Amino acid sequence: MNNIIQAEIPEQLCQQAELLIQQGWASNLQEIINDALRRYLESHQELLTEAFIQEDVEWGLRGND
Amino acid sequence: MLNGACVVMTNKTLVVADAGVLIHLDELGALDVLRNYEAVFVPNAVWVEVLHHRPQALKNDSIALIHVSDVSYSPKVTAMARLFTLHSGEYEALNVCLDQEIDTLLTDDTAARLAANNLNIKVHGTLGLLIRAVRCDLRSPDNILQLLADIPKKTTLHIRPQLLISVIEQVKQEWLNNK
């Protein structure tokens, strides 16, 4: 099942996306938005973020720089 | 001094900042925790972003901000930026790290941290910098505990509330044990 969401996107981003579609790098805007969202979620996984925060806290407490 | 020496006090260090850390520290009125870095390099894309959201952060006299308007781009960083879909500020910040041979990036962004790790660049964020301020005798433990507790209501830094509570508890215990 797909959800429909409404979002405001800067005009410049839209134009760049449209250009990619015209050049044949993507089939439509939805494909680009899905891919961008998927990549964002992959690189911002909760466990990863929490691990980084813990590393940061350890450095804050016991680092030497 | 609590738990370990802070080398920065005698051997000052250069760092590159992403927008998030500058904005979040300014929101807490704590940009001065960066004052014992010799200089904080701010790439142009980051400068523009901070100027848009938090212009007063760039006028803080307690820290040495260096506006880097001319950034050289590395193919390695370009590849990382694509892989981790980095924003222009994070992209420029990593490029400045490589170009200026600065080994520390200040960012709160997970993707930027991942990319920096892959480029052997050390990364520190708002929480670490606040906690470090006690180690470096820049702020008191009570003051930093209060600032950590203020993060959800005073800043745009998003942290899972339970995780923040456990971090506060962890550092409180650590500082109590070292008193």
Image (tube, coloured by chain):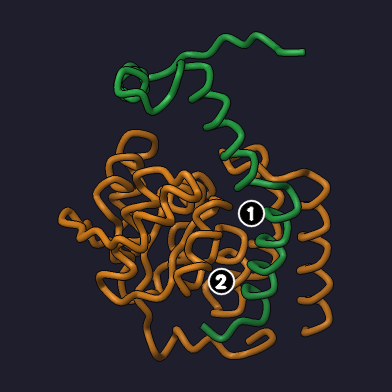
Chain colours: A green, B orange
In the image, what residue type sits under mark 1? Leu
Where's residue B112, x and y in %? 49, 55
Q: Is residue A15 above or below residue B95?
A: above
Judge left or right: residue B100 versus residue B165.
left
Q: Which mark is residue B133?
A: 2
Q: Mark 1 = which residue?
A: B147
The quadrant the C terminus of chain B occupies is bottom right
Q: Report the residue at 53% width, 68% height from top.
A: B117
Closer to us: A35 or B24: A35
Where's residue B18, x and y in %? 41, 53
Residue B47 at least partly seen: yes
Q: Is residue A6 above or below residue B19?
A: above
Q: Could you tell me which secondary element the residue under label 1 belongs to?
A: helix
Q: Report the residue at 30% width, 57% height from top.
A: B42
Contact? badges 1 and 2 (CB < 8 Å): no
Closer to us: A46 or B162: A46
Residue A54: image quadrant is bottom right
Residue A14: image quadrant is top left
The span from disc 1 to disc 2 (Cα, nearest Å) is 11 Å
Farthest-out residue, left? B70
Q: Report the residue at 24% width, 58% height from top.
A: B73
